[in-house]
Image (cartoon, rainbow, N blue to C red):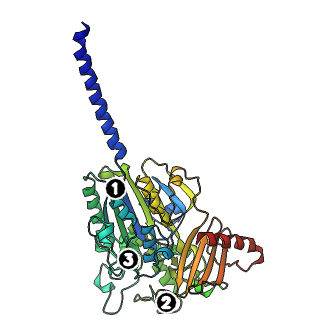
Amino acid sequence: MFLARIPIIFLFSALLSTVCSADSNSDSKRVSTRPNVLFIAADDLRMNLGCYGDEIAVTPNLDRLAGQGIVFDRAYCQFPSCNSSRASLITGMRPDSISVWRLNQDFRKLNPDIVTLPQHFKGNGYHTESIGKVLHNYGGIRDNEKSWSVLARMDQENHFRDYALKKNGWKGKSRGIAAENEDVEDEAYVDGRITQDAVSTIQRLAQQEEPFFLAVGFLKPHSPYNAPRKYWDLYRREDMKPLGPVTRTENVPDYNWFDFSEIRLLSDIPNEGPIPDELARRLRHGYYAATSFVDSNVGQLLDALEQAGIADNTIVVFWSDHGYHLGENDHWTKVMARDLDGHVPLIVKAPGKQVARTEAIVEYTDLYPTLVELCGLPEMDGLDGKSFRHVIDNPKLAARDAALTQVCRPWPKGEIEQMGYSLRNERYRYTQWIDHRSKTLLAEELYDHQTDPLERNNLAANPESQNASLELRLLMKRTR
């Protein structure tokens, strides 16, 4: 009787072992499946989003993303200009570490052995693709061989030739108008075509077994502020006001102000002098319309993830390369050592993580090690960035004591004579202007954001602020 039952017990045991082994293999597969990464960039986008408290911004899709992830209220770029900021972010290194300060400096030629963020993912089993402006769209800065599994697409498109109608665009040596408002489809502009490509790419990549790192970079709201009319119609012209005074401050070093030529080259902008009020309102209107255009494109990418069934296994990161002035402080565009230029939007949606906001101070260099840690990749040594994974796990935790942003003078051309290094901590912005050759201190700035959010009143020489200045001088020494 006992002997007769042995085969049955053995068979049951073998069957149980097989089932357990299958479950174990299934669990192992789930554990080892790494999340995808959708890495979305906007160009020249400041903090004018609904999720950041802008009361007139129409940005429902970015607000939706904010409601699914973590909103960073204190994120800062490392150089408020396209190329330097993007090179810094993609390498996890500050501009001084990679010697990239100008628009035409190729980080790869200057640092041939550096490993970029997508390159590290590519080297660890990820399929990597780039669509649109991720690296700078100037001078053939592409990094196709090392960073991307396939050739980058639409990455060298020119902002100043992105018009729907020929009558409004570049003619001979003359650039087009500053803000095109025409009743056209989204695909009349490069960003609409980038979105079409990105949506089909998400559908394709969702069918692959290997995880993907997909970077999508939009050209807007960078000037010219062009967008289909339906996005202009979301706003009223009378609401287009600056955030504060449009006059130049009187007690700020000359280094921290200049009349940047980017929009001066557009055909309907005066070559010099103040920009008339009505024109300024139209420019702001175009900027907000272009922002809503970006928002719509982001929404289509989020929808594509959901429709492909991979939203729950995809990290989504939304960022802008730097902030922007829209006439405040008598300045337009960027490359100032000010909060409007250095303070940037950052939203991270990570599967299984809580929805929250955080006051933790982070730099864009920190994205590299954070994504590496979130995706379980080998740690990279030698980065300037520091992982804020712990903040994603617990948004109440701190990250950095201060974030460092820098600019150079003159700009955008010529041999560098001065470098401005600007620290932002919880309360103050402190800036040092340094002679680039001798490294001697030329000037200082100190602003108290509790009372002066637009940084109009320089307290560096104020006797009552010397304790704060001393503390920040020491912090600057440690940070740089």
Q: Position of residue 473 (x, y in %)?
A: 67, 73
Q: What is the distance, in whole Å, between disc 3 and disc 2 at their CAs? A: 33 Å
Q: Which residue bears the numbered disc 3?
A: 226
Q: 233 or 29, which lies in front?
A: 29
Tag 3 secondary structure: loop
Quadrant of residue 127 within the rendered picture: bottom left
**Above or below — where is 440 with respect to 96?**
below
**Residue type of the residue flagged with mark 1:** Asp
**Above or below — where is 66 with respect to 271?**
above
The N terminus - image quarter = top left
Tag 2 secondary structure: loop
Position of residue 386 in the picture relative to residue 227 (left or right):
right
Q: 429 or 263, which lies in front?
A: 429
Q: Earlier in the sequence, mark 1 or mark 2?
A: 1
In the current view of this chain or complex, which residue is farthest to the top?
1
**Above or below — where is 314 with respect to 108?**
above
Q: Which mark is residue 415?
A: 2
Q: Residue at image x 41%, y 81%?
A: 105
Q: Residue at image x 53%, y 92%?
A: 273
**Residue type of the residue flagged with mark 3:** Asn
Q: Which residue bears the numbered disc 1?
A: 303
Instruction: Say if residue 285 shows up in the picture.
Output: no
Give the class, few, some or many, for how many residues have Cα within 10 Å of label 2's Cα (few <14, many ≥20): few
Q: Residue at image x 28%, y 22%?
A: 13
**Above or below — where is 11 with respect to 362?**
above
